[in-house]
Image: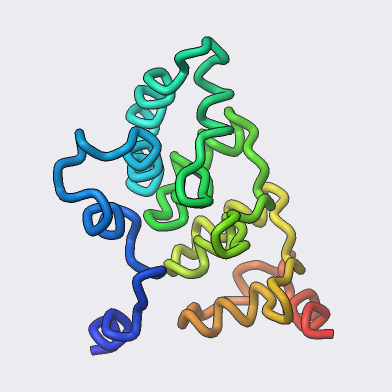
Amino acid sequence: GEGKERGRRMGMREWPLPRLYEVLHGEERDRWPPEARFLEAAHNGDVREIKKIAKELDVQGHGIRTMVTNTTYMGMNALHAAGGGGKLPIYRHLVEEVKMDVDMPDTAQEFTPVSHAIMYGHLPAVRYLLDHGADLHQRRGKITLLHMAVVHGMKWNFTCWPEYSLVSFSQSFT
């Protein structure tokens, strides 16, 4: 089916983070760098686990919130990694409580959190990020969010989201 075909076309960059980390570090998660375990927890939507790992990483006493905000691995932070799982509680925690920047691109591919959510097909997460200030008109070169959504097979229901109308999307093409 369509899912199998997409799986065959996926390059290593598009593997889910846990799979990529297994290839890089082996299957024994306790041997992974704590930053990798932290991003896997964000990918899986596990707020409790990211707080636990952030506490482990906070050897200088900066606080859990600071560690959650500043911990990166392979160019990504927790908000980028959350796009792989698309679970709304992790977004609520990272955006509303931790106050992470919804438009900060990763340093690996220059994808923003909403780009990651689109890439993995998590429409509720896309909506959440747009509702919480993500830039609808952001570009990565000449690629807009709408282009990315179409490429990744996302069907946008414009009637459900009148505030993100077709007019807004067509403006991003200019």
Q: Residue at x 39, y 69 (%)?
A: 14
Q: Classify 101 as above or below 163.
A: above
Q: Position of residue 105 (x, y in %)?
A: 64, 55
Give the colour scheme of this rendering: rainbow
Q: Is residue 132 left or right of residue 149?
A: right
Q: Position of residue 91 (x, y in %)?
A: 51, 43
Point out the image quarter for the C terminus. bottom right
Q: Is residue 94 left or right of residue 137?
A: left
Q: Is residue 59 left or right of residue 132?
A: left
Q: Residue at x 69, y 72 (%)?
A: 140
Foreground residue, 145 or 16?
16
Point out the image quarter for the N terminus. bottom left
Q: Is residue 137 left or right of residue 53?
A: right
Question: Which residue is most to the left?
Answer: 28
Q: Position of residue 120 (x, y in %)?
A: 43, 67
Q: Residue at x 20, y 40 (%)?
A: 29
Q: Residue at x 72, y 65 (%)?
A: 136
Q: Position of residue 85 (x, y in %)?
A: 37, 54
Picture mark count: 0
